[in-house]
Image (cartoon, helix red, strand yellow):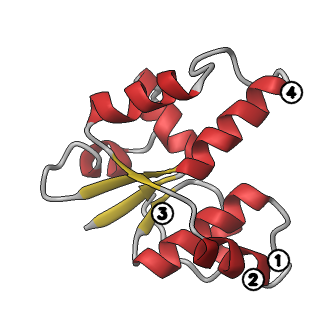
Amino acid sequence: MRLLLDTHALLWWSAGDPQLNAAAREAIPDRRNEIWVSAASAWEIAAQQRLGKLPPLAADAKAFGHLRAAAGFELLPVSVADAWQAGAMADANRDPFDRMLAAQSEIEQLVPVTRDPAFAAFQTHTLW
């Protein structure tokens, strides 16, 4: 299975947080699965830290890169096609990070690992 971690799933996985559900805890370390992390998650982490909503867990791009690489996750850059798709999606969800991950999952045929109910508005099948 090809999985795209939502930002909270990435952070919870790296911290061993029990909020990550059993399906995700089982699927992420399974070597038969490809695990992807979007560059949009780095953007979201930086924005949340700037607003004081996250501790300085991954305060810069190097820390984000090390977090991703240490876990063996693939990096998914944001492309023009991703941006176009995210911008053209129906206004069911105004969160730009959710929209980007939904667009990337559609374009790249990835299953988002997320507990966020907003993905239902995009008619995106998720793993949770």
Q: Secondary structure at mark 3?
A: strand
- As rendered, which of 74 and 15 lies closer to the eye? 74
Q: Do the CB atoms of the residues marked 4 and 2 lie less than 8 Å apart?
A: no
Q: Earlier in the sequence, mark 3 or mark 1?
A: 1
Q: Residues within 10 Å of mark 2 (few under 14, many from 20)?
A: some
Q: Earlier in the sequence, mark 3 or mark 4?
A: 4
Q: Position of residue 14 (x, y in %)?
A: 41, 27
Asked whether residue 35 appears in the rendered view, the answer is yes
Kind of residue at badge 2: Met
Task: Give the quadrant of the C terminus.
Answer: bottom left
Q: Do the CB atoms of the residues marked 4 and 1 lie less than 8 Å apart?
A: no
Q: Which residue is mark 2?
A: 89
Frontmost of labels 3 and 4 is: 4
Cα distance in 3D space between marks 3 and 2: 17 Å
Kind of residue at badge 4: Leu
- As rendered, which of 17 and 33 lies closer to the eye? 33
Q: Secondary structure at mark 4?
A: loop
Q: Which residue is mark 1?
A: 92
State the image quarter where residue 86 is shown: bottom right
Kind of residue at badge 3: Pro
Q: Which residue is mark 3?
A: 112
Cα distance in 3D space between marks 3 and 4: 25 Å
The disc label shown at residue 51, or none: 4
Q: Secondary structure at mark 1?
A: loop
Left or right for 73, reference 106 = left
In this view, the residue farthest toward the left is 32
- Residue drawn at (70%, 67%), measured in percent from left and top? 99
Q: Do the CB atoms of the residues marked 3 and 1 lie less than 8 Å apart?
A: no
